[in-house]
Each structure stands twice: as C-alpha cells, then as structure tokens.
Amino acid sequence: MIPRYAREKMTALWSPETKYRIWFEIEAHAADAMAELGVIPKEAAKIIWDKGRDAKFDADRIDAIEREVKHDVIAFLTHLAEIVGPEARFVHQGMTSSDVLDTTLAVQLSRAADILIEDVDALLAALKRRAFEYKTTPTIGRSHGIHAEPTTFGLKLASFYAEFARARARLVNARAEIATSAVSGAVGTFANVSPKVEAHVAKAMGLSVEPVSTQVIPRDRHAMYFATLGVVASSLERLATEIRHLQRSEVGEAEEFFSAGQKGSSAMPHKRNPILSENLAGLARMVRAYAMPAMENVALWHERDISHSSVERYIGPDATITLDFALARATGLIDKLVVYPERMRANLERTQGLFASGRVLLALTQKGMAREDAYALVQENAMRAWRGEGTLADLLKVNQAVSKLLSPAEIAELFGLDYHLKEVDMIFARVFGTDK
C-alpha cells in the first residue's frame, strides 16, 4: 500500500489494530457458543469478553512474540492470555489458525466491498448528473478513432453510467460470495469443534457458513472477488481513456479541471495535462494485476497449505485500497470535468458533412439504386470532400446520378442532426428509467 494512493477509511480496515480486534471477536464469539454447549465454563466466556472487549492489543508485543514462536495466531493468543489471564486456556478450543484467519479475511473483504459499493454509488451520481446536463449536446461519435456518426455527450456518459451500474451489481455479488465463515477445525471435519460454534460465529460476524471448508475457505471465492475488482478497474480505465482522448489538443472537447495555481509541466508553462486520467489508467493496471495471483491461489494442496497466505497479505489491502482511491478520484474528475460544446460542434462539422454518408447511402437505396452502386457513389464523393473539394452535400447536389433521385431539399435534410439523435430519450429511459 502506498499512502499517496490510499484513503483513511479503507486503510484503517487493514490496520493491525482492526485485524486483531476481529481476531478477538471471532475467538470471543466462539467462546460464547462453546459455553452454551457446555464445552467451556460460561464464566470463562464472560471473562474473555470483559477483559478483551476494550483491550488495546499491542501490535509490537505480538510481533515480538511471533519472532520467537514463528506463528502469528499463536503470538496473538499468547498476548491475549496476558490480557485475559487463566481463563485464556478456554480460548481457541478445537479451532485452527485458518478458522481465525479465513473468517477474518472474509470480514475484511466484505467490509471493503461495502466501501467500494459506496464509492461506485458516488461515481454513478456524478455520471448521472453530467449525463443529463449534456443529454442533447451533439458531438461526433468515433470508431477506430475516426469520425463516424453524431451522438451526444450525454449518451457517452450514460454509457459509462450503465457500465458502472453493472460494476455495482458485480461488487454486490462478489461481496455475497466472499462473506463466508469457517470454524471447522483441523481439515474441516468439526471433530474438535461443533458446527453450532461456526454458525454462531458466522451470524455474529455478519457472514454465512461455508458448506465445505476443508481447513480453509475455498479460494475460488477469493479469485472471483479479485477478478471483479479487476473488471471494475478496467471500466475505470475505459472512462479515463475517453477523457484522455477528448483532452488532446487536436480534439479539445473536454478536459480535467485545472485549479488556480496548478502547473502542468516543469518545462512548458502552457501545459494542462490529463494527469488524473493517466493516473487512473495506471492504477487500473495494478488492480488487474492482483487478480492473477488470486486465481493461482485456487489450487492449494489437499485440505490446506499456506501458499495463498503471503499473496493475500499483499493483494487484500493493496487491491481494495487502490480501487477505493481510484473510484473516488474518478468521481471527482467527472464532477468537475470541463466540457466544451462549441468545440464538439466544430469538430462534428470539420469533415464537411461526412457524418451523413450512411444516411445518404440508405436514402439512395430506398429510391431504387442498387446498394453497391450507391455505396460507390457516396464513397467517391466522400473522398472528394475529405480532400477539401467541397462539402459532401454540395458535391451530391451537382451529381447527376444523385439529382435524378433526390432533390436539393431532400439532400439537405439528410444532413440534419435531429435524425441521429431522435432516440436519445429512449436510450436515457433504458439507462435511468423515468427518474430525471
């Protein structure tokens, strides 16, 4: 985790203090269930809670113990015994380290998903507001980076809104899939701990019960979770790439907000660079990179090994912290994005009406011309317009083959923008419903 790309709420979730607090809660809830089953004295369970509820677990002390015992959970339990006293012997009855570690990771990833869903909600709100602001603002659509047919800037943003609505749904599903608890003991057979203990802990921690946990929760769940983060990051990169293109000097249709006192280049004072979008592209690469090791973690040996452990200590914090930061940055970018409708109109018109070539093709075929002939005729005149010999409309008006089928008024009408934008309301209704 790099502080430059981290926000406090998500970072706190992965702090040693939070982790040890969750460890304690799992152990204490398990003790409650064991006390109800008569496995340990009820008074012992009460003392464990009384002594540990408000305790400040000393990360440095736990680290010192771990240096000796070479085991993080044992180090924690030893420190807990220092706090709780003799009743600590009833802690962790029949449980394994994985019961604590895997359930804790499920809690952290679930809470991280909650934060990420909140982040997406904020981005969706910004996209919706700006989409309606520019709902009918015409701009040229591009395919392969080349002018195609007209669209609106609002439709561009509506497309991103729909994509991040899907991202939200994926995060909700990923959260549900990761939120399982395992308190099943060695190799997951419940030989030394009752399934009732697991059920109690799961409910107390806001999780469901893992049906078959061997000695670890199956890592296909984690692979899907981190793959989902990677897909969300890819959507962020698509958004960032669009803005980076629109901010190019040759395009100039939109740009990132440039604050008073901001500087774009140490050498060239005129520069206003799309640094936020470029940063988002880089952060997206990092989040995607964490998905692959999560997939490689699926194939563990038999009932358990720890080849996944070191990986998850990296990717759990780093992937969620990075994506949290990136989503918040994207929201600010969209919220303050500077849009230039006049430049959009100028760019749309700079190709001398070429955007209407497809409509002219259709009109000629509807008047009886063979499609192959119509295509060749329109393409020939489009290339002349491309070379600067006149507008496509003017060239078509003096073409004898065209004038036999289409009047000057009919030709002029083919170059109107309303035709291309007539279904904008319908598309917005699909994306946003009737709520405006």
Image (cartoon, helix red, strand yellow):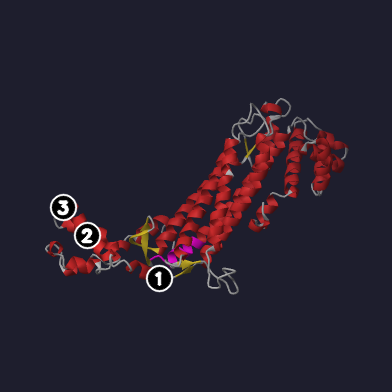
* Relative horizontal placement of residue 403, taking residue 435 as reference (left or right): left
How packed is label 1: few (under 14 Cα within 10 Å), some, or many (20 or more)? Answer: some
Residue 312, by quadrant, is: top right
Q: Which residue in the protein does label 2 denote?
A: 380
* Relative horizontal placement of residue 36, taking residue 355 as reference (left or right): right
Vertical order, 129 against 260 (above or below): above
What's the mark number on residue 370? Answer: 3
* Residue type, numbered disc 2: Glu
* Residue type, numbered disc 1: Arg
Q: Earlier in the sequence, mark 3 or mark 1?
A: 1
Vertical order, 431 against 392 (above or below): above
Magenta: main secondary structure equals helix
Kindly report which numbered mark, 2 or 1, lies closer to the viewer in this rendering: 2
Q: Mark 3–mark 1 contact, CB under 8 Å?
A: no
User: Secondary structure under badge 1?
Assistant: helix
How packed is label 3: few (under 14 Cα within 10 Å), some, or many (20 or more)? Answer: few
Q: Mark 2–mark 1 contact, CB under 8 Å?
A: no
User: Which stretch is magenta?
Assistant: 126-136
